[in-house]
């Protein structure tokens, strides 16, 4: 699953506020805020909704590996 750091990085790439992501993922702002601060373990359904909203906006998640986890904005020309 995606991490809090990946969510924050993806929002930054898109220029989205927490409220915008919460609205697009149809999750509560409180849940997203707590998740990004790593104050709680998120439900799988919440993480899935957030991940889906970000992927639909053009974010690609890079899994942790030798060089670490990350995100990137998919080339809209591809």
Image (tube, rainbow, N blue to C red):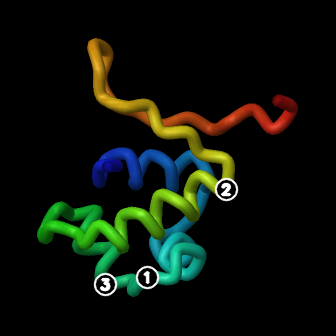
What whole-number distance in Å separates the C-alpha atoms at marks 3 and 1? 8 Å
How far across and how far down the image is residue 53, in percent?
57, 64
Which one is nearer the viewer's eye here, 19 or 26?
26
Q: Which mark is residue 27?
A: 1
Q: In this rendering, which labeled residue sits more in front, label 3 or label 1?
A: 1
Q: Secondary structure at mark 3?
A: helix
Residue at left 41%, top 33%? 70
Q: Which mark is residue 39?
A: none
Q: Secondary structure at mark 1?
A: loop
The residue identified by callout 3 is 30
Which of the image's four quarters has the C terminus? top right
The residue identified by callout 2 is 57
Which one is nearer the viewer's eye here, 32 or 41?
41
Q: Earlier in the sequence, mark 3 or mark 2?
A: 3
How far across and how far down the image is residue 72, in percent?
56, 34
Q: Secondary structure at mark 2?
A: loop
Q: In this rendering, which labeled residue sits more in front, label 3 or label 2?
A: 2
């Amino acid at each position: 699953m995606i991490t809090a750091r990946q969510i924050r990085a993806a929002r930054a790439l898109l220029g989205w506020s927490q409220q915008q992501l919460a609205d697009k993922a149809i999750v509560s702002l409180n849940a997203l805020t707590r998740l990004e601060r790593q104050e709680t373990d998120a439900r799988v359904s919440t993480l899935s909704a957030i991940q889906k909203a970000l992927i639909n906006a053009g974010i690609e998640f890079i899994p942790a590996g030798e060089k670490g986890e990350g995100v990137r904005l998919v080339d809209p020309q591809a």
